[in-house]
Amino acid sequence: MTADLGRVDAELRKAVETEDDLLTEIAAHLIKAGGKRLRPGFAIASAAVGASEAGPASHEVVLGGVSVELVHLGSLYHDDVMDEAETRRTVDSVNARWGNLKAILGGDFLLAKASEIAAGLGTEVAGLLAATIAKLCEGQVRELRNIFNVGRSEENYLGAIAGKTAALFAAATRIGGIVGGLSRADIDRLTVFGTEYGMAFQIVDDILDVVSTEEELGKPSGNDLMQGVYTLPVIRTLSGPDRDVLLPLLGRPLSKDEVERPRALVSGNGSINDSVSTARGYIDRALEALVPLPDNAGTQALRGAAHHLLGTLPTSV
Ligand code: GRG
């Protein structure tokens, strides 16, 4: 698996080579900066679920993972423009280094390369990836429409994260299953795993934004509250006994100093534990989807990732 991820990196770098040095540099910026490569890992592990013996992933499976990571990267370029983010993957964001116009074009270029690679893997994969890009946009718009909305519903939150995050994890596992030649029933099981894991992943990410320090996260924390993205712990606090204290503190942009009070309020009540329970429920359903699958290195890797996710929460939570 580690060797397969090395191949993913080599193909990612190859995919963004162009005759224009600047475009190549911009498109390779976040590839070089690292990242966990979770989505290609999920594509490779999913294909391995169908393998009769352990061994390296096929070239097509590696390219399946690359296409998904390129969509992820493109979405990060655009997301950082929207959020005016200064850092990503511990380095300058593309917008901070080259400005918004080049960051948007760099993101477009990554999406185009993802589509080109997916087309080489067949019409089903190409169609799935295109539909997934649309879901990401839908999820992001759903979130944007509720910025600073103190009345944001849990249903709206869950719908938004299903689109902006879970859809791409589902595409990763599904593409791995399709390219790996698994049965339709098993491809569907892997898709459920990716979706449920992706929901838990975003909930955990949102919990960490409230409870972690900047040092722990490696990026500024409390961003969601400052920028008016009211996530599960906030929505739950707003429907609990602390509502009247929290409500007047929200509904507008907050500075780093101003965010500390609402953050302490949201961290200090049961909403964090409730949100952890919700994430755990998604992880339970993700693991359940794997039960009928063969118990091999692929399934073990997916199970391991699911267990690991909850372990990333601070122990005090
Ligand atoms: C252009 C495809 C496209 C989409 C436009 C901007 C947008 C709509 C959607 C944004 C979606 C987004 C950024 C969701 C957050 C996903 C998320 C949790 C990112 C962090 O993922 P990690 O932790 O990051 O896997 P690394 O850096 O490790 O890869």
Image: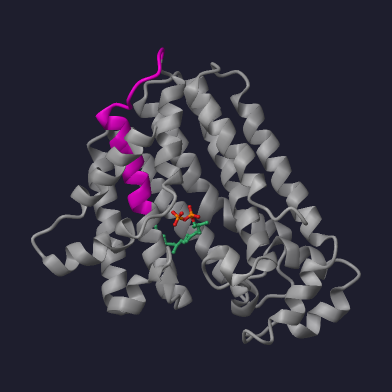
Residue 125, visible in the rendered structure: no
Work out whether residue 162 or residue 242 is closer to the camera in this orientation and state it: 242
State the residue at coordinates (61%, 41%): 308
Residue 39, visible in the rendered structure: yes
The residues colored magenta run: 52-71
Residue 47, position in %: x, y?
41, 26
Q: Is residue 149 magenta?
A: no
Residue 54, position in %: x, y?
40, 18
Our reading of the magenta stretch's main secondary structure is: helix
Location of residue 246 by image quarter: bottom right
Quarter containing the C terminus = bottom right
Left or right of 216 on screen, residue 130: left
Residue 287, position in %: x, y?
64, 31
Left or right of 102 on screen, residue 238: right
Residue 213, position in %: x, y?
63, 69
State the residue at coordinates (33%, 51%): 70
The colour scheme applied to this rendered structure is: one colour
